[in-house]
Amino acid sequence: MIIDARLHAVDIDTGRSVGVGSDDQVVIASLFKILVVLEFARQVVAGQLDPRDREVVRAPDRLGGWGTAGCADDVEVSLRDLAYFAMSVTDNTAADLLLRRVGPDVVPMLAAELGLSRTRVVDGPRQVLESMFEDVGAHDAASFATAFAGLSEERVRALRVFDPAQTTSSTPREITRLLSLIWRDEAGPAAACAMVRELMARQIFWTRLPSGFPADVRVTTKTGTLPGLHIDAGMVEYPDGGRYAVAVFARTRRLQARRIDVDLAIGEAARSAVEELRRM
């Protein structure tokens, strides 16, 4: 089922942590959107952006997938709704447009400011898609789908999007650090951190980290997915006040994006890690 996995979990109030491969460089896929939305929130609080400003999502903007990315017609939305779609349904087009507004050069600077020295921000959603097209010799989504279906596992894994040295990447430990800073109001103004937490809480996907915990435990996460890569990272908050940042990166031999068995295994791994922290 799972070829390998990397995990880091930390009690954000005591600093106690557990992990496996916590400092390995890993592709973070859509976890990148946390940084984009955090920068958006910081600029809103600073008065640099008006969250009510409008964007029109047109056909050339659409990257395919959920939310505005999969719409058939032009859609007009506010910047804060782009942030909502980017976090709630991991909308690639929304994240791409939001990245343009905050400034793609600013997001790597934000990572550096937060002490995320091994977090490499080199691609937005559009650049990731374009690199995949280039690597298989496709010119559009239809020709990519045809070409991708005929690739061997080895050929797929050779795509740049799967190489942490050639795409946006980080480590499990740095992802939990980012989450810890947001939850402790140390990633920017308190109002900006609160905005990110509220948006993350609206994510609709629940079968990964949240699946491992009982209903009275609040689990707020952001997923990341590529063929054969299954990622989830977020905050686990217990009724007794315990707060734990957890990041899990799983790689499977089969390349399907939808794997409920892997999702549930991610939840079980997260619960085991948090339970170990709670016993310390």
Image (cartoon, rainbow, N blue to C red):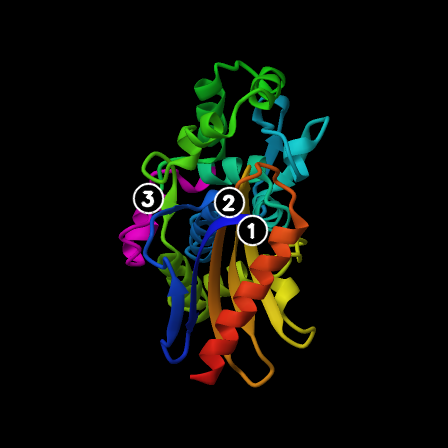
Q: Residue at x 56, y 42 (%)?
A: 53
Secondary structure beneath label 2? helix
Please say if 234 is above or below 252: below
User: Looking at the figure, which quarter contains the C terminus?
Assistant: bottom left
Residue 127 placement (x, y as % from top left): 44, 29
Residue 196 placement (x, y as % from top left): 52, 59
Secondary structure beneath label 3? loop
Amino acid carrying label 1: it is: Thr
Amino acid carrying label 3: it is: Arg
Residue 263 placement (x, y as % from top left): 62, 54
Q: What's the mark number on residue 120?
A: 3
Q: Is residue 16 visible?
A: yes
Mark 1 in CB contact with mark 3 (< 8 angstroms): no
Please say if 158 is above or below 32: above
Q: Is residue 157 left or right of residue 81?
A: left
Q: What's the mark number on residue 169?
A: none
Q: Earlier in the sequence, mark 3 or mark 2?
A: 2
Please say if 96 is above or below 58: below
Instruction: Tell me the residue that label 2 is attached to.
Output: 30
- Residue 75 forms part of the magenta stretch: no
Residue 208 placement (x, y as % from top left): 61, 57
Amino acid carrying label 2: it is: Ser
Q: Residues within 10 Å of mark 1 (few under 14, many from 20)?
A: many
Q: Earlier in the sequence, mark 1 or mark 3?
A: 3
Q: Residue at x 60, y 82 (%)?
A: 239
Instruction: Tell me the residue that label 1 is attached to.
Output: 223
Q: Which residues are magenta?
A: 101-120
Q: Residue at x 63, y 23 (%)?
A: 59
Q: Is residue 75 left or right of residue 273?
A: right
Mark 1 in CB contact with mark 2 (< 8 angstroms): yes
